[in-house]
Amino acid sequence: MKRYYQPEIETASREEILKIQNEKIVKQVKYVYDNVPYYRNLMDQKGVSPDDIRSVDDIKKLPFLTKDDLREAYPYGLLGTDLKNCVRIHSTSGTTGKRVVAFYTQHDIDIWEDCCARAIVAAGGDDEDVCQVCYGYGLFTGGSGLHGGSHKVGCLTLPMSSGNTDRQIQFMMDMQATILCCTPSYAAFIGETLAEKGYKPEDNKLKAGIFGAEPWTEEMRAEIEKSLGIKAYDIYGLTETSGPGVAFECEAQKGMHINEDHFYAEVIDPDTGEVLPEGSKGELVFTSLDKEGFPLLRYRTKDICILSREKCSCGRTHVKMTKPLGRSDDMMIIRGVNVFPSQIETVLLKEGYTPNYQIVVDRKNNTDTFDIYVEFPKEMFSDKISEMQNREQDLKAAMRSMLGIGPKIHLVAPKTIQRSEGKAVRVIDKRKLHD
Ligand code: DLL
């Protein structure tokens, strides 16, 4: 039996979806123009007025919005309504004062949780399930999003947040969790830890996992499915658009359905901004269709993917996106946390180091390793090992406070990091994250 959380909309015909989108886009653009001066300016500069937008076909007339715009408008510049109408914020990690902060009204939270509920039901969830949420709770959207979705579906929700694997396993076993929500690398780690503790895949009651927030491959899916004895489903989203649940995988496990009644997706050429036809690989751009707190028109995600309208065996009609196939900027996702090399450089300079550094990321035993090699300035040198170790610890703490995760710091002698004649090679990412 096929199951949907909101069957009418999830299986609506193409015409019905377009009708909904066309009605919503007219309202959303007017709403943004009337309430968000920052974006009104961009529209005025481009000579576009709300009257020019009569259907989603007209979206291409609108200016793009980028992460830089979000930073420039920080904190309230893109707010779509009075703060008193907002009930929550979430945020990405980021250079202090330049984080992306998203605002939610209760209506926004409701929509977001519906999207996550769709993902849980698509993974086979219902009110008899026990849903263990071990995405981080707090400013990160993963925990709250899946938590809200799990409530909507009526699952017994285990609000575990991330970390403390022994406790995760204890609750998983004692509460007989049936659905696991976390990053794929953490799922793989839980699988390994279970095996180390002598559990076999059939010893747990899990049947499905909803994993996202970072890139993962089909090989990793196979490994997680085997070690936990489950079906592993992908889920995609970003703080700017609300969080997880913008798109989710169904039983076909072949691409993620975008919740098209709430988000309009385009794929563009990242260099020219030209909208590409279906089936082309390019940068994903989202337009929210009914958000209040933080509405976004033509937001460039920097995620590279391909859209497809091929008929899906699950019966859902919403367009599908491939897993993100890469990024059009230098953002890395390390242990589920978004990290920009520029943030690392900011900390190094603030702490008195030179900008001669190299970031090495790898994945060992399904966990990301994160090392920073940095030259210490001559005057910092000490022949006491403990003093140098203290400096490494201090720098690690400063990095942790900026990034949310602590890299292993290696202080190396001046002039030992290879100089480049062209663009400096700052990042060596040895992980094979894309198929
Ligand atoms: O990662 C939201 C999320 C939470 C998604 C839990 C799924 C599950 P941000 O921290 O703002 O939000 O990071 C957004 O993460 O632009 C992608 O580059 C990447 N990303 C998110 N989901 C996936 C996925 C959350 N399934 C950025 N596969 C996005 C690959 C993903 N990359």
Image (spheres, helix red, strand yellow):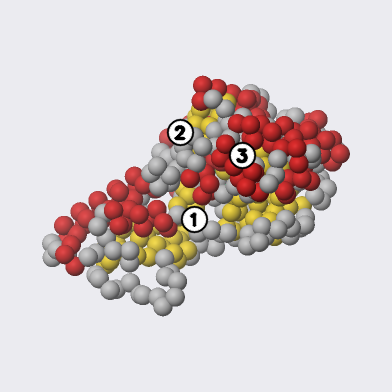
Q: Counting residues from the N terminus, which is met first, the one under dot 3 or under dot 2?
A: 3
CA gap between label 3 and label 2 equals 32 Å
- Residue at (51% x, 21% y) in the render: 84
Residue 379 as seen in the image, left or right of residue 278: left
CA gap between label 3 and label 1 equals 32 Å
Q: Counting residues from the N terminus, which is met first, the one under dot 1 or under dot 2?
A: 2
Which of the image's four quarters has the C terminus? bottom right
Would you call the spot at circle 2 few (<14 residues within 10 Å), some (14-19), or many (20 or more)? few
Identity of the amino acid at label 3? Arg
Would you call the spot at circle 1 few (<14 residues within 10 Å), some (14-19), or many (20 or more)? some
Residue 370: quadrant of the picture: bottom left
Task: Quickly name the residue at label 2.
Answer: 138
Up/down of 360 relative to 395, above or below: below
Q: Which mark is residue 40?
A: 3
Residue 234 as seen in the image, left or right of residue 91: right
Identity of the amino acid at label 2? Gly
- Residue at (50% x, 62% y) in the render: 431
- Residue at (28% x, 66% y) in the render: 375
Which of the image's four quarters has the N terminus? top right
Residue 129: quadrant of the picture: top right
Image spot of residue 232 (x, y percent): 63, 45
Q: Counting residues from the N terminus, which is met first, the one under dot 3 or under dot 1?
A: 3
Identity of the amino acid at label 1? Met
Whether residue 269 appears in this view of the structure is yes
Would you call the spot at circle 3 few (<14 residues within 10 Å), some (14-19), or many (20 or more)? some
Image spot of residue 383 (x, y percent): 13, 65
- Residue at (64% x, 55% y) in the render: 283
Queried on whether the Cβ of the residue with tag 1 lies below 8 angstroms from ligand 1, the answer reads: no
Up/down of 377 relative to 91, above or below: below
Task: Quickly name the residue at label 1.
Answer: 332
